[in-house]
Image: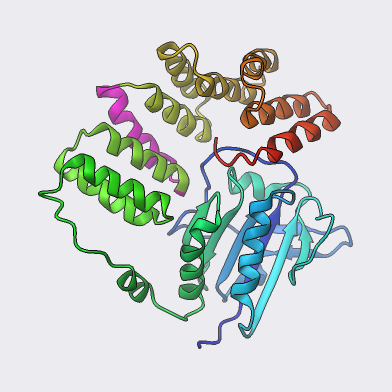
Amino acid sequence: MKRTAFFILAILIAAPVFASGLSLYPGKTLPPFELGQPDGSRFSSDELKGTPSVIVYVQPEQSRSHELLEDLERLSSGIENLNVVALSATPFEEWTYPFKKYVDPSRSLYEEWRVRVFPVVIFVDAEEIVQASFSGYTRGEHETLSAEFKILTGQITREEWDSSKAEEPVSFETTPTDELMGLGQRHWQDGFPERAKEVWDKVLEKEPDYPNAHLALTRYFLKMGDLPAAIEHVEKPIATNPSEEAWLLAARARLLSEDLKGAEEAAENALDLNRRSFDAKLTLAEVYLAENWLEEAEELVLEVRMMKKDSPRALYLSGRIAEARGDLQEAIKLYREALALQWTDW
């Protein structure tokens, strides 16, 4: 087995943010960073230079984050010259993993990398180029995690992995469009977003204006953090067949791009199409939060909570409102309630 030194960087953030839009997508260079430590020392990205890295972004109290750390512990066992580093905004109450720890108290990486759905895995090569990334890790994606780990550490090549997973060839010309969309969705759910994208791209080659393919690719690019591409795709169905889903995806992409006016317009359009939509109300509330319109945001969030008391997204947004008002104790309480419901998507 190839001897490769690398780091596993686990960023452990105190409060979750339930949205897509990771900024570290394949092909992007890892931005330089430096974190001051309580003892006066510093930890920086310079320590990652020249070696492949697995960056893991987790939430301390989330069970799936612990599952990810456990899976990585098993994968890294026995690998020679392995450096494991864990960062946290707040420390774990109990730490049982063989990872060195540093803290990220200002949440600077959390903000810069746009971490939204926990946990996140990012694979970075020796030249500090992101090779793969996905968020919202579940054990259903363990096979993909294991493969990317082995590719990064030189145990297999990407060509070997792709060949081992090859399926019967699909005739894109003769297969009905709805069956192709279903095939792409299965790849997506099985943890193979690149395969899903390939299928959806083929759909658009057949039918360039097919709205569901554009919406599927919008979700793909949101997951990858490529916001311009996400916006480009969602604009197509908005122009030809505007649906609630299209407007909500547009609102998400524009909000992450810091186009607050455009995000507000899109969320309002979604709500106009369905005045009872919880998603539309909470998306608009999130835009109001970004604009610091706390009363308007709270009105929408409380309306949803009255109708759906177990909405983790509504609880989370209530926590953000409390935090914005300086009531950190109430904010933490609400964040914990949202986490207890195991919410993993925006």
Q: Residue at x 65, y 27 (%)?
A: 310
Residue 302 lies left or right of residue 227; in this view the side is right
Q: Of helix, strand and loop, which mostly describes the magenta segment?
A: helix
Residue 338: quadrant of the picture:
top right
Rendering coords of residue 40 (x, y %)? 87, 62
Rendering coords of residue 216 (x, y %)? 35, 40
| Total marks in image | 0
Residues 332 and 66: in front is 66
**Is residue 58 among the parts visible in the rendering?**
no
Rendering coords of residue 151 (x, y %)? 45, 74
Which residue ends up furthest to the right in the rendered image? 39
**Is residue 52 among the parts visible in the rendering?**
yes
Q: Residue at x 73, y 69 (%)?
A: 99
Residue 179 lies left or right of residue 232; in this view the side is left
Q: In which quadrant will I find the C terminus?
A: top right
Residues 229 and 150: in front is 150
Magenta stretch: includes residue 152: no
Q: Residue at x 55, y 87 (%)?
A: 3
Q: Which residues are magenta?
A: 224-241
Residue 219 lies left or right of residue 61; in this view the side is left
